Image (spheres, rainbow, N blue to C red):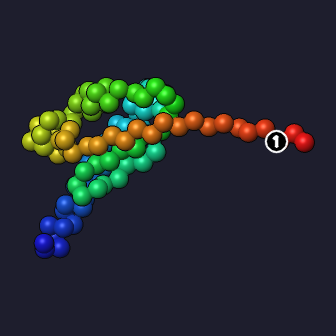
């Protein structure tokens, strides 16, 4: 692949990750979860969120992405198709442990 094409593709992937990451941060706040990261795995935008049970509904995230202009295919949207996004939900529970009595 020529360098110019590679550079354009990387720039497009980075912009897509930023767009999806921004949407994920906003949506995570609305459902009481935290944005952990966005990454690219062989062209698939992977969003990781952490939070308490119950898990938020992934369909609601899809609807949220749709409302921001992410279409069902690249031609309909900002170059991001829903099928290019994977949502990883990681339940998280934190507990402060008391000092052992003894």
> Where residue 17 sits: x, y (%)?
31, 49
When asked about the image quadrant of residue 84, the answer is: top left
> Where residue 77 sits: x, y (%)?
16, 39
- Taking the image as shown, residue 14 lies to the left or right of residue 96, namely left
Residue that lies at the very extreme toward the right in this rendered image: 102
Position above or below: 51 against 46: above
- Taking the image as shown, residue 70 lies to the left or right of residue 37, namely left
Given residues 36 and 78, the one toward you in this image is: 36
Total numbered labels: 1
Position above or below: 98 against 16: above
When asked about the image quadrant of residue 61, the answer is: top left
Given residues 89 and 22, the one toward you in this image is: 89
Q: Secondary structure at mark 1?
A: loop
Q: Identify the residue shown where x is 21% and y is 66%.
A: 7
Residue 78 in view: no
Quadrant containing the N terminus is bottom left
Residue that lies at the very extreme toward the front in this rendered image: 102
Q: Identify the residue shown where x is 29% and y is 56%.
A: 41
Q: Identify the residue shown where x is 37% and y is 41%.
A: 88
When asked about the image quadrant of residue 90, the answer is: top left
Residue that lies at the very extreme toward the left in this rendered image: 75
Given residues 28 and 102, the one toward you in this image is: 102
Q: Residues within 10 Å of mark 1 (few under 14, many from 20)?
A: few
Q: Which residue is mark 1?
A: 99
> Where residue 13 sits: x, y (%)?
25, 55
Position above or below: 67 against 100: above
> Where residue 82 sits: x, y (%)?
20, 38
Residue 20 in view: yes
């Amino acid at each position: 692949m020529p360098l110019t094409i590679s550079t354009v593709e990387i720039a497009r992937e980075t912009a897509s990750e930023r767009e999806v990451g921004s949407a994920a941060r906003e949506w995570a706040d609305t459902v009481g979860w935290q944005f952990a990261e966005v990454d690219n795995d062989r062209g698939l935008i992977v969003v990781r969120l952490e939070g308490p049970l119950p898990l938020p509904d992934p369909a609601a995230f899809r609807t949220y992405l749709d409302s921001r202009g992410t279409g069902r295919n690249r031609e309909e949207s900002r170059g991001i198709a829903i099928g290019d996004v994977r949502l990883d939900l990681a339940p998280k529970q934190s507990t402060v442990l008391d000092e052992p009595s003894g």
